Amino acid sequence: MTSRLVCFDLDNTLIDRDRAFVAWARWWVGRAGLGPEAVDWLIANDNGGFTPRGELFRGFERRFGVGISVDDYDREHPPFTSVDPEVLDGLATLRASGWRVAVVTNGNVVQQSAKLAHTGIDRAVDYCCISGAVGVRKPDARIFAIAAEGAGAGLEGGWMIGDHPAYDIAGGINAGLRTIRIGSHHAVDSPIADHHFDSVLEAFALLSS
């Protein structure tokens, strides 16, 4: 019998990526000797991480006259991430009940790998699939096939849980997975997930029931 698969997005699903970005921005701006308006600018223009970092930091330099290195950011931002213990407990419960658990995240290898290692999520799941490593991004169904193979599971009867309708939910649907949307971080509301919860903890409860 093929093991069942459940895929989780990383940013703003298993971890609070936006909170980590704010913490990093305050730290970096303070170190650079700039005022709170620089923090406000970064937050306002970050777009939940979807503004390309090069574009964001070029705009910051034009506005404040100080450059931010993308390579430095990729190293410095991950230590500001954290995971709630209840999330790690939820992942452990799913695996103990027979689910194969994978993280499926868009992003570059350096930063996403560092986040996964720093939080311990990489050790709490069966497989981590980073788009920058496999050359395919959500919502392409192929990334879920790669995750399923890596986790030792099949796609049939599986789930995708994430915060972004156009990437996580659409990707899960493309791969034939049932879907759960977490939070309301993005204005786009389609496609519609099978369930919509405020917290990933509610998704754990549903899948464990």
Image (tube, helix red, strand yellow):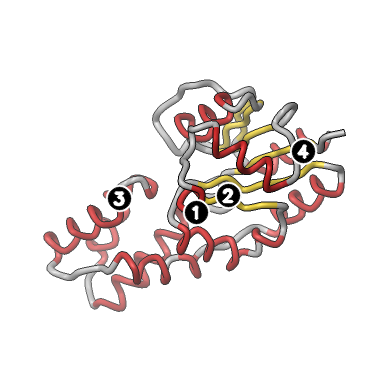
Q: Amino acid at mark 4?
A: Ala
Indicate which disc, 2 or 3, sits on the residue closer to the N terminus. Answer: 3
Between 44 and 17, the one nearer to me in the picture: 17
The residue carrying pointer 2 sits among few (fewer than 14), some (14 to 19) or many (20 or more) residues within 10 Å by Cα, namely many
* Residue located beneath label 4 in the image: 205
Camera-near label (2 vs 3) is: 2
Q: Quadrant of residue 47?
A: top left
Q: Tell me the quarter of the image containing the C terminus.
A: top right
Indicate which disc, 2 or 4, sits on the residue closer to the N terminus. Answer: 2
CA gap, disc 2 and disc 1: 7 Å
Left or right: residue 126 compared with residue 109: right
Between 139 and 8, the one nearer to me in the picture: 139
* Residue located beneath label 2 in the image: 129
Indicate which disc, 3 or 4, sits on the residue closer to the N terminus. Answer: 3
Residue at image position (17%, 56%) is 59
CA gap, disc 3 and disc 4: 35 Å
Left or right: residue 29 compared with residue 205: left
Left or right: residue 31 compared with residue 115: left
The residue carrying pointer 1 sits among few (fewer than 14), some (14 to 19) or many (20 or more) residues within 10 Å by Cα, namely some
Q: Position of residue 80 (x, y in %)?
A: 49, 67
The residue carrying pointer 4 sits among few (fewer than 14), some (14 to 19) or many (20 or more) residues within 10 Å by Cα, namely few
Q: Amino acid at mark 3?
A: Pro
* Residue located beneath label 1 in the image: 133
* Residue located beneath label 3 in the image: 52
Indicate which disc, 4 or 1, sits on the residue closer to the N terminus. Answer: 1
Q: Position of residue 82 (x, y in %)?
A: 57, 62
